[in-house]
Image (tube, grey):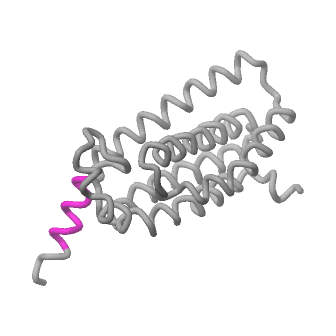
Amino acid sequence: MEMFLSYWMLPILFILHDFEEMIAMPIWKRRHRRMLSTMSKPFFGAVSNGQAFSCGVLEEMTILLVVSAICSVTNDSTLYLAFCIAYASHFIMHYRMCMQMRAYVPGVVSATIEMPVMIWLIISYWHMGQATLETFLAYQAVVLLFVYANLLIMHRLMPAIQSRLLAYANDPA
């Protein structure tokens, strides 16, 4: 049981979830390009290249590794709980996209498998909590703002990353 309550469980679950997205997203976007082209904000942003999407995943994974390291060193279960809740809440987006598309959306299978694990982790860390409700809510607000801002920044950067990767691939050496 202790292994599952390790501060390293969140990055492990994250990468398993994002493997599904990295594998399926480029093919899925190609298959649904007509519908996505009619959306003002297409699912998974403007990026269609798997390598560019993977750069965003790498950046997010690095953040989670740093958070896990900080939580391990400081034994800060409140910070870890806030990131667990932020991660689990993004699964709702996958379900919303599925309902809107009435079809499979990359990430929904792993989100469905991981949701019970995340609920268990959240409940476990909540009961182990060292912080007052006010402190927890402050942590959660800061984490959600950070995660949302990071997501916005990465979705703006990934098209430029995609362009650079494609330019590199097409440049005769």
Label count reads 0
Look at 42% across and 48% down and name the residue there.
101
Left or right of 125? Residue 155 is left
In the displayed orientation, state which residue is furthest to the front.
102
Q: Is residue 167 magenta?
A: yes
In the displayed orientation, state which residue is furthest to the bottom.
173
Look at 77% across and 41% down and name the residue there.
75
Main SS class of the magenta portion in the image: helix
Look at 75% across and 51% down and name the residue there.
117
Q: What stretch is highlighted in magenta?
A: 159-168
Horizontal and vertical percent for residue 136?
Answer: 70, 24
Horizontal and vertical percent for residue 112?
Answer: 65, 53
- Image quarter in which the N terminus is found: bottom right
Q: In this view, does 104 lie above or below 82?
A: below
Q: In which quarter of the image is residue 165?
A: bottom left
Q: Does the magenta stretch include residue 162?
A: yes
Q: In this view, does 27 lie above or below 41?
A: below
Frontmost residue, 157 versus 21:
21
Frontmost residue, 136 versus 69:
136
- Image quarter in which the C terminus is found: bottom left
Horizontal and vertical percent for residue 66?
Answer: 58, 49
Left or right of 117? Residue 20 is left
